Image: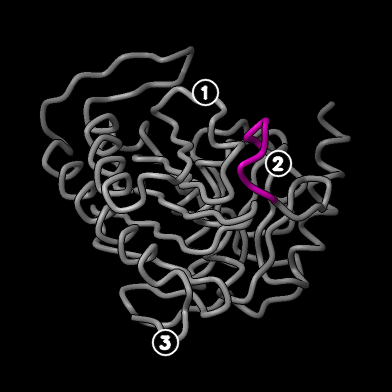
Amino acid sequence: MIENFPYDEELAIAEHAARKAGAAVMDLFKGKYDVREKSRNNPVTTADLEANRLIREIVHERFPGDGWLSEEDKDGGERLRRSRVWVIDPIDGTKEFIEGVPQFAVSIAFVQDEKPRAAVVFNPAKSRLYKAAAGHGAFLNDGVIHVTPREGVDGARLLVSRSEPQRKFRVFVERCEIKPVGSIAYRLAKVAAGDGDGTLTFRSIHEWDICAGVLMVEEAGGKVVDGSGNGLLFNQREPRHRGVVAANTRLSEGLQSLWIAAMEQTT
């Protein structure tokens, strides 16, 4: 329980669902499961689908009137008529899951009026459960977490995708320490916990990939913007953002400026 947190029940349900889904995922990790391609270079496994089913069942049983946006369910747009919406990625980092790399996470966020209010990012392979409560902080396995205080870009430790084309990162490689980490939800959570100074992507990224992680970083004292430097809102008609930059407030400004420079050099 978080004292005086108005979404305490939503956070508890998110944690319960993440743990249930995580257990199901780990039952299949490095075991036998089916894989198919939803689209080019976009795999889905029976673990994704089972985790999604469990989360949906748990959330809808307690909050049947809430909207729903998940990577593994067709988006019919009904959520746009709701002020309360759950934004879900049952396994962010499916490619890592398939490769046996323990850098994937269950990502669950509760959104009220376009802003995440409660969030959980759970890496079951590492037993690391991150959670965030709007206005009440961010936590890793119930310990309070904070972003790092590093202000300068030079020497900053950046967590980046394992699969994103590296040519766009050239300007960052020259000035930063680069560490590849799979899931962007997990990267955002690790930045919130101070396990990296920042993270960024040049990709157009879906809401379900980042919604929980955005609240995690913000509640840990950081800032998350899109590639143009704008803050992020969720449960949008087109549920994606063009680029993401996350770090503490001062560092995020420097990284976002470099993000623009890198895009200009590669387009």
Q: Nearer the viewer, residue 104 or 213?
A: 213
Task: List the single residue furthest toward the bottom.
Answer: 3
- For label 3, the residue is 3
Residue 28, by quadrant, is top left
Label 2 crowd (10 A; few <14 / some 14-19 / many >=20): some
The residue segment tinted magenta is: 233-240
Which quadrant does the C terminus fall into? Answer: top right
- For label 1, the residue is 76
Residue type, numbered disc 3 = Glu
Residue 199 in the image: state x and y as whole percent: 61, 55
The residues bearing labels 3 and 2 have C-alpha atoms spaced at a distance of: 35 Å
Q: Nearer the viewer, residue 238 or 261?
A: 238
Q: Image point 23% across, 49% down: which residue?
A: 22
Q: SS of the residue at dot 3? A: loop
Residue 158 in the image: state x and y as whole percent: 60, 58
* N-terminal-most mark, 3 or 1: 3
* N-terminal-most mark, 3 or 2: 3
- For label 2, the residue is 243
Residue type, numbered disc 1 = Gly
For the question of whether residue 182 can be seen, the reply is no
Q: SS of the residue at dot 1? A: loop
* N-terminal-most mark, 1 or 2: 1
Residue 25, by quadrant, is top left
Q: Is residue 237 on the magenta stretch?
A: yes
The residues bearing labels 1 and 2 have C-alpha atoms spaced at a distance of: 25 Å
Residue 149 in the image: state x and y as whole percent: 65, 80
**Is 230 above or below relative to 119?**
above
Q: Which mark is on residue 67? A: none
Q: Main secondary structure of the magenta part?
A: loop
Residue type, numbered disc 2 = Gly
